[in-house]
Image (cartoon, rainbow, N blue to C red):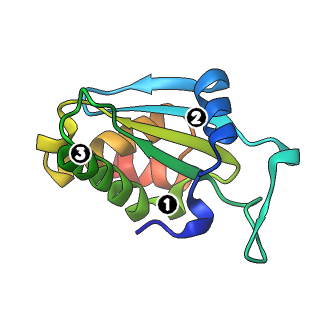
Amino acid sequence: MLPQRYRLRRSADLKRVRTEGRGRRHPLAILVVRRQESSAITVDNGRSTKNVSRFAFSASRHVGSAVVRNRAKRLLREAVRAHIDQVEPGWDCLLIARPQTPTATFAEVETAVQQLLSRSHILSRRATDNQNNA
């Protein structure tokens, strides 16, 4: 599970990411990113979310039934969780599942998420260098 401070949950924040963010597409997912505003920094349970990037996950009914949509979101969430320490702080991100996501393997989804984060230029330089060397 993604730690709470890395979650983007307020509907106003999600709407702002959708309308003002820039998107990148991959056959398995869409990533929409937006730089956090300094005034949008909140404190959750005594912790400031200033120095972290926050993520939200979505899947429309085109992806499939509720069970299938939840599987797609779980795959995306786990792929982000595995690489959360490589993401530059200060970004709000929305990952949207596509119809091919639930049938893909975890390795394929993980690669797709890494490519999307890299193309959006929000992976740290160290992570990008490691990815190029692999």
The spot of residue 129 in percent (x, y) is 46, 49
- Given this view, does label 3 or label 2 mark the residue nearer the observer? 3
Q: Position of residue 111 (x, y in %)?
A: 28, 45
Decide which of tag 3 and tag 2 comes sooner along the chain: 2
Is residue 124 something one can see in this rendering? no
**Which amino acid, mark 2?**
Val
Can you name the residue that lies furthest to the right here? 39
Residue located at (53% from left, 50% from top): 55
Q: Report how far apart the C-alphas of labels 3 and 1 lie in the structure.
A: 26 Å
Find disc 2 in the rendering and name its residue: 33
The disc labelled 1 sits on which kind of residue? Ile
Asked whether the residues under the numbered discs 2 and 1 touch, taking CB atoms below 8 Å apart as contact, a structural biologist would say no
Disc 1 target residue: 84
Measure the alpha-carbon separation of dots 3 and 2. 25 Å
* Residue 16 as seen in the image, left or right of residue 23: right
Query: Residue 133: where, in percent of width, then height?
Result: 34, 50
Looking at the image, is mark 2 or mark 1 earlier in the sequence? 2
Instruction: Work out whether 122 lies above or below 63.
Output: below
Q: Is residue 134 toward the left or the right of residue 93 in the image? A: left
Which residue occupies the foreground of this view, 129 or 42? 42
Q: Secondary structure at mark 2?
A: strand
Q: Which mark is residue 66?
A: 3
Return the x and y of residue 5 as percentages of the image width and height: 62, 66
Which residue type carries mark 3?
A: Ala
The residue carrying pointer 1 sits among few (fewer than 14), some (14 to 19) or many (20 or more) residues within 10 Å by Cα, namely some
Q: How far is disc 2 from disc 1 in space, using C-alphas?
A: 15 Å
Q: Is residue 46 above or below residue 37?
A: below
The residue located at (19%, 53%) in the rendering is 106
> What numbered label is drawn on residue 103?
none
Of marks 3 and 1, the one in the foreground:
3
